[in-house]
Structure formats: structure tokens, C-alpha cells
Amino acid sequence: MNDMTVEVAKELVKVYGRALLEDPERLGQLLEDECGNARREIFIISFALKEIARGGEVPSFEKFTEDRERIIEKLCRNLGFAKESSIWAVDAISRILECGSEELAPDGHIEAHSGFLESITSGIAKRPRTAPFRKKTLRNGLLLLCIIMSFLVLFVTITESRYAVSNEHRILFLAHLSGTDAASGHVRLKAAQMAADQINAEGGVRGRPIHILGYDIQSSPEEAAEVLDGLLREKNVAAVISACSDSVNPAIAKVADKRETPLILTESSATSATMSAVDRPWLYTFRTNFDNPYRGRLLAYFLAHGLKRRTVALVSEAYDVDSSEMRSSFKQWNATYGGSILCEEVYTKRGGLDRASIEEIISSGADAVVIANHMPDIAPLLQSLRAYGYDGVVLGAAYDESMQIAGGEALDNSWWIVPASPDDPQLQSYQALYRNKYNESVFGSDFAGTLLAYDAVRWMADALNRSPDFRGEALRHSFMSTKNMPLLHATLSIDPRSHGPWNKSASLVYCSEGRGRFQKRFRPE
């Protein structure tokens, strides 16, 4: 960590006084002017001070030293700081506080001086008889000054709303950067940074660069909401991108509405992530990925118009909300397209169908089996289908390389609808760009995840460029009015009823000889 920020902060406290520590946003801006290359350290100190002063003023050096371990634990818990970052932040603030403690006398009090009372009484005694007139004049002058200041504040507020904080657009990028999902989270963050670097190389947005602030979010909805709420209280973030799972997205969508900060979800499938009620979306939350109802529609459309199949056996996962939403949507759209469901079966997570259920599917005479699930952990289901005698067409909404490794030839004669495929010729340039920048490639579900994160930043830049100012309400309308926005993985238009993509194209993969091959992009007509 760069200790230069600590030395600069100590000098700033000497100049502006200890009260500067109770205004972390101002301290952060002053530090950026003096040592702009140490953005990570400035970010950590500013956010840590904000959290420490949340309950009141910043404690004295002695009190802060006594509570050192408790404060370190508090920063880890409330802000999601790594232990090393929390320790550095606490030690840095301790050194700054030690410098600031020299302002007061040893007993901590202001000492009165002689002649103070005499000057007051003599002033009263010598007050002229014109005091009432002067008091009225003073009152009128103060009133006029207040009116002028009010207009000035209003003018400054309106003017400042048109500019990014600290001459840059700060985008908070939330991902699972630790634990079992750490590897996936980091490649998504890298893709977002790659998009920002490209935009900045092209001149940024209205001459200001995009600054990605990556942040680790845990899987607890309550903790995620509390952490995001603390971050957004800083008021220096233009918008938020979440590459997190749906375990936390509905919770942070509430926070985005509360803080009036636009939030883009790149991984979300659950309808609750963007919908606060059945017919009402969260005002500030949008998504780039398919939701479960749209996946159900894609399955029904391709079954009827692509495969020309009319009768189907519908298979879904028991006790799974995503699978249930997809199943309900498929049934509705399948009826609209003239299809019929001959039988329905359920299976348990990571398990296959039993022999009796598969015999029921075969005896029904269905033209195809549709699997209402978008998670790529269904190889056991395919293996049980083939093992017990079903050799017909399978159609589903999940596919990546891990499936062909686990399922092998059981995937043959199956079709899969996914957001993006690494075999798509139009995406080869993206793969080469990522590989050249980071000296690594992305595979499996991580490919679509990185692409959606990359395109979310490109969409963010477009919305910022179209917005009349960079505050929440105006920026929200820019996102909501997005129409025919050309992204790498698809052309994006936003449905104002759901804040999700409107008729976005999907990629089609067909499996034969033990592997999947990209076929084409399509969308419902």
C-alpha cells in the first residue's frame, strides 16, 4: 500500500484542522488533487473514515487506539474490506489522528484570556441610540443575503449535477471476488475494466474517463444490501453494475431505489430482481441478461418455428424458483404457438429422472423433451434419459463445455438456447482482445458472463453520453429509453414494463458427436 497518502493527509489536517476527518468526501477530493495515483488507498481511507464517523464524530487518538481491533472487525463486516486492507486503513487513520491531536491543549479545553468580559461590557455601554435602526437594516441585509445565497446554492446544485465527481465517471462493479465463485467474479471484473480502458482510450464520456471500482460482495442478501447502502451514501458513484447471483440482486435492487442510483444486473434471471411487484419494476434497476419468462418464450418459439414440433414432454426441477418461472412461461407461449404438452415430469437437483418417469415420456409419443432449467448441471438428467431408452430431440436453455465433459454422447441430438456462444464468429474479436490483454482465455459459463459485463460498461457509457446530467433520475431515464443499442452479444432495447431486454436475440447450439456447435442467432418474431 502507498503510505504517501497518509503523509499528505497529515499535512492537510494541519492546514484545515481536525474537522477535515469528519468530512471524508472533502478529504478524498483533496487527496486526489495531491496524490491522484494512489486511488485505491484514497478510496480505502475515505470509506473507512465514513464508516467510523457514522455514529458521530471521529474518536480521539487514544480512544481510537483502544478500539483498534473492534474497528478492524467493523470495517471487514460492514464494508467488505479484506483483513489486510482493514488493518492498513486503521493504522493509517491512527497516524493521521495522532497528528490531529496536537491541535488541542493537553487537557482538551480552550483557555479563557483576561479582558474578554470587559470588552463585551464596554461594547454594550457604548452602543449608540441608533441601534434599533441599525438592527432593522442588519436584519434586512441578512434576509437579502440569504435569498442571494439560496439562489447561488440552487445554481451550483444544478450546475454540479451536469458533471461527474472528481472529473471522472465512477462505476461501482459488484461481484463475488472471494470464496468458491472468486475465479468467475475476477474474470467478469477484468472484462468490465477492459471495456472501460477502451472507452477511455477513445476519449472517455464527454471528455471524462470511466473509473471502475471493483467490490467484493458476499452471498448474504442482508450483508450485500448493507454494504451497498454504505457505499452509495458517499454520493460519488454514478451507477452500479452487479455481476452477482440472484441470491443478492433483489436485495440490492431495493437499495438502488432508495439511493436513486441506477443498477445494471448482468447475471440475473429471477423476475424479482427487476420487478418490485407483478406489474411494477424497480425504478432504478435494469438487466442485460434474459429473465426466466423470456427463456420460456424462446424455448416455445424455437420448438414451434425452428424444430416444427407440436407435442412435448416438459421436464422441470422440483423446488426451484427459476425452473418454475420458466416452466410457467413455456406453457403459456407453447399454447400461443399451437403446441400441446403430453406429459410433465420433475427431477431433483443434480439428479436424473427415474425409469418410470422416462417410460411415461416415451409412451406419451411426444415429439421432443423440453428441459425448463438454465443451469448447466443437468448432465445426470440427460444420461438417465438416454440410459432408459429416450433417443429423441432434447431442447433446453443451458449449455457450456462442462456439460459435454460430464454428459458425453448423452448430449447428442440436443438443442440449447444461450445468451452467447464462444463459437459465434462475430465474437472472435472479443475473445482475441481479452486473450491479448490478460494472456488467458475464458470458457464455459464464464464466457457469456464476461461478455455481459463488458457490454454493461459499454451500455453505461452510452447512457451517460445521452443523459442531460449525471445524477440518478436523468441517468435512469437514459437507461429506460435505450433502443436498438448495438452491443457485442446482441442489439439491446429495454422494455419499460420490466426493465429487461425487449426481444433480444439468443444463440443456438446443437450437440452431436459429443460436442456442441454454434448454429445461429435468432429472436422471436
Image (cartoon, grey):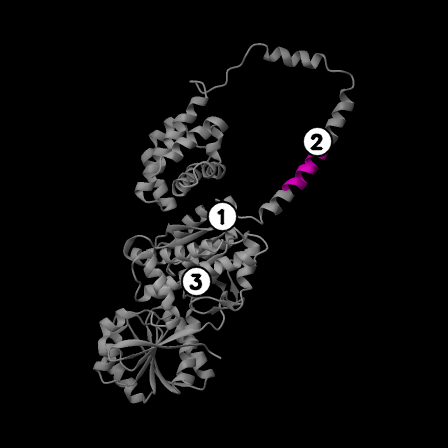
Against 504, residue 276 (above or below) is above
Rendered residue at 36%/56% (across/down): 190
Q: Picture coordinates of residue 71 (x, y %)? A: 35, 37
For label 2, the residue is 142
Mark 3 or 2, nearer chain start: 2
Q: Quadrant of the N terminus?
A: top left
**Can residue 143 be seen in the rendering of this structure?**
yes
Q: Is residue 147 magenta?
A: yes
Could you tell whether 300 is left or right of 179 in the image? right
Distance (Cα) linking label 1 and label 3: 20 Å
Distance (Cα) linking label 3 and label 2: 53 Å
Mark 2 or 1, nearer chain start: 2
For label 3, the residue is 455
Dot 3 surroundings within 10 Å: few (below 14), some, or many (20 or more)? many
Mark 1 or 3, nearer chain start: 1
Q: Is residue 458 magenta?
A: no
Residues 428 and 220: in front is 428
